[in-house]
Amino acid sequence: METPIKIFVEGIADQKLIYDYLCHLYGANCIQKQNIISTKGKDNLHSQIQQFQKNTDNEGINLLIFDADDPDFKGTIEKLNQLKSDLNIEFETFLLPNNQDAGDLESLLEKIINTDHEVIFSCWEDYEKCLQSHEKNYTVPAKKTKIYGYLSALLPNSKTQQEKAKERERNYQNSNHWNLEAEYLQPLKQFLDPHFNSSSDENL
């Protein structure tokens, strides 16, 4: 019997990426969608205490994949370790984008686009520079908007197709949009490899 694995992430966008990436690496049966759990942010980790403890009691493995938002990467690790101690729960941690640098999901996504479409980001950077240099001091859109804009530019201009640019609807296995074989994903793959394998016959 396979060891039960639960993966705790911050939100819907993370759930979709991690599920698609696991399916890409290890096959569609490697994990059930409901075992990738959104905590709705770091501050809500306590809301999942029972899930953590129940899985540990069942000799399962808890994996935590969160953003390294803090400018000090080590600072984020320290906060999570303190939470682990305070809440008396067990988990292994990976911080996006690469378990080394400060950043977030969008920082990772910028690194794994299909390079055939890099011009979209070049145009976006020109747009940002224009806003920054304008005398009216316009606000530069958040990175989430940049990723949405990238996908929106690639999709046909219909309501149904444009829905696919939204976090919940994205298909990260679409090789025209994303490169799940990108070197930048290697740290995440190395974190996941010990817990999954391509020969899994059952959902975890």
Image: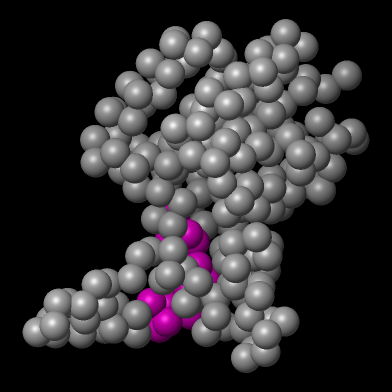
Identify the residue at horizontal 52%, vertical 84% (top origin). 153
What is the chief secondary structure element of the magenta stretch? helix
* 178 in the magenta segment: no
* 118 in the magenta segment: yes
The vertical placement of 204 against 180, above or below, is above
In this figure, what is the number of numbered marks? 0
Left or right for 179, reference 142: right
Q: Residue furthest bottom?
A: 157
Left or right for 58, reference 153: right
Res 184 seen here: no
Q: How is the image coloured?
A: one colour
- Residue 66 position, x and y percent, is 48, 38
- Residue 77 position, x and y percent, is 36, 26
Res 29 seen here: yes
The vertical placement of 99 against 151, above or below, is above
- Residue 75 position, x and y percent, is 27, 28
Along the line of sight, which residue is nearer the eye, 53 or 94? Answer: 53
Identify the residue at horizontal 24%, vertical 72% (top origin). 139
For the record, the magenta segment spans 108-122
Identify the residue at horizontal 43%, vertical 70% (top origin). 145
Identify the residue at horizontal 52%, vertical 9% (top origin). 88
Left or right for 163, reference 74: right
The vertical placement of 83 against 201, above or below, is above
